[in-house]
Image: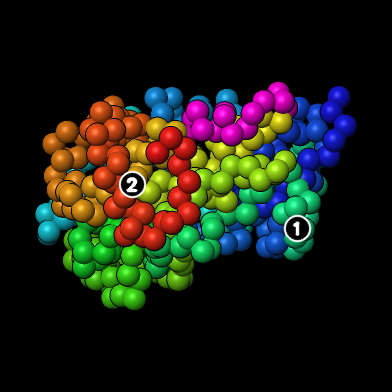
Amino acid sequence: MPKKTIKILGAGLSGLTAGINLAKAGYTVEIYEKRADSGARFHGDLQGLENWSEKVDVLDDLRTMNIDVSFDYTPFSEFFGIDGGKTRPFKFYEAIFYVVKRGSMEGSIDQSLKNQTLKLGVKIKYNQTVSPTDVDIVATGPITKAVVGAAKGIVFETTHLDIAIGIADTSVANGGYAYLLITKGYGCLFSAVCGDLSNINDCFDETKKIITKTLSLDIKNPRNVGGVACFATHNKYREGEKLFVGEAAGLQDLLFGFGMRHAIKSGYIAAQSIIKNQNYEKNIEKYFFKKRRAGIVNRYLWEKTLNSRTYFFLFHNLLSKKFLFSFYNFNLIQRMLYPLALKYVKNTHSLQDLQLKNS
C-alpha cells in the first residue's frame, strides 16, 4: 500500500480527477483550493463537453478514467450555425457534444467530481492554499498572464425547447464566436472575444440582438456570467518533482476553447504516472502532441486564412465526426501549415513563452 501523501493544488476538474485515481490506488490525498468550493469560478455557465477529438465517446472515456457520470448532461447531435444572416443546420448520427453545467450548484460536473473525491476519503481543504513548491500536482487553472480572450454572457430561465446555436461574425466576437445553449428550461448566451477585448460589451449586445431576431426567445431571471480564455499555452508539464495539469499546464483548445476533456485527461495521466512510476512528460506529450499542434493550425486558419464564415461553409458541406476528428489530430494539411501557423500565433498573440518540443 502506498505510504506517501500526495498533495494537489487546485480542486477543479483536473485536480479532482487526479485525486480520484490516486485515492483508488491507495494513496492518501490532500487537495488545497483557494476558493470556497469546487466550480466557484463559474456561475451556472453551460459548456460543451466535446465528443469529437477521440473516437471513443467522451462519457465512456470518463468511465475508463474512474469517473462516474453522475452529473447532469444533455447530448446534442444537432446544432445551428449563423453566419452573415444565414442559418445552417449541422446534424450528426451521434452526440457531437454534451452540455453540462459549471459551478458550485447541484448537478454540475464540478460538484459531481468533488463528491466522488470526498467519498474516497480525500481531504479537500477549501479557502486554503499552499506554496506550489510544497505540492506534487499543480492544478490551479488558467495562466493569468497568458489571457488572450474573454467571454461575457448571461444564464437564464426559459420555456424554449433545447437548442444549440453558434454564431460566426466579427460583429458578435472578433477572433472568437458566440453561442446559445438551452437545455431543460435553462439557457446560456455568450460572446467569446479573442485579441482586442475592448468591445466585448458591444459584441454581447449584438449577439443578443441576432438571437432574439432569429428566435422567439423568452429570457427570465437573467444573471451575468463571464470568463477568460488562455490560449497562450506554454505547456509546462513539470518543474522539479511537481506535475502540472489542465490549464496550469497550458492545455486548452486554441480554436474554440474547449478544455474540460483536456483537463480531465491530464489529471488522469498525472495520477497514472505516479501510480505506475512512469515519466509523466512522456505520457502527456504522447497524448497531446498532435492535438496541440492541430490547435495552433486551427487558430491560424480561423483568424487568418479562412475566416469564420468560410469555416462554417466548409463544415456545413463536409462535416462529420470523422472530419472533425482529423482537424483535432494533426492531419496532413495541418502538418504542412504548422510552421507558418506557429509563427503567426506566436507573433499575433505574443506567445513568446510557447514551449513546443520538436517544433
Nearer to us in this view, 239 or 7: 239
Quarter that holds the C terminus? top left
SS class, disc 2: helix
Q: Nearer the viewer, mark 1 or mark 2?
A: 2
**Residue 231, horizontal then vertical, whole percent:** 42, 54
Q: Earlier in the sequence, mark 1 or mark 2?
A: 1
- Is residue 92 visible in the rendered image? The answer is no
**Residue 214, horizontal then vertical, whole percent:** 19, 61
Q: Magenta stretch?
A: 275-288
- Which residue is at 80% across, 33% downward? 27
Q: Where residue 354 is drawn, which disc sits there?
A: none
- Can residue 283 be found in the magenta stretch? yes
Residue behind mark 2:
342
Magenta segment's dominant SS is helix
Verify CB contact (< 8 Å) between mark 1 and mark 2.
Answer: no
Q: Judge left or right: residue 227 versus residue 218.
A: right
- Identify which amino acid the numbered label 2 is placed on: Leu
Crowding at dot 2, Cα within 10 Å, few <14 / some 14-19 / many 20+, comes out as many
Distance between the alpha carbons at the discs numbered 1 and 2: 33 Å
Determine the image quadrant of residue 16. Answer: top right
Up/down of 312 relative to 174, above or below: above
Nearer to us in this view, 307 or 111: 307
- Identify which amino acid the numbered label 1 is placed on: Ser
Residue behind mark 1:
131
- Is residue 355 visible in the rendered image? The answer is yes
Q: Judge left or right: residue 358 versus residue 108.
A: left
- Which residue is at 71% across, 23% downward? 276
**Residue 60, horizontal then vertical, whole percent:** 50, 27
- Can residue 312 be found in the magenta stretch? no
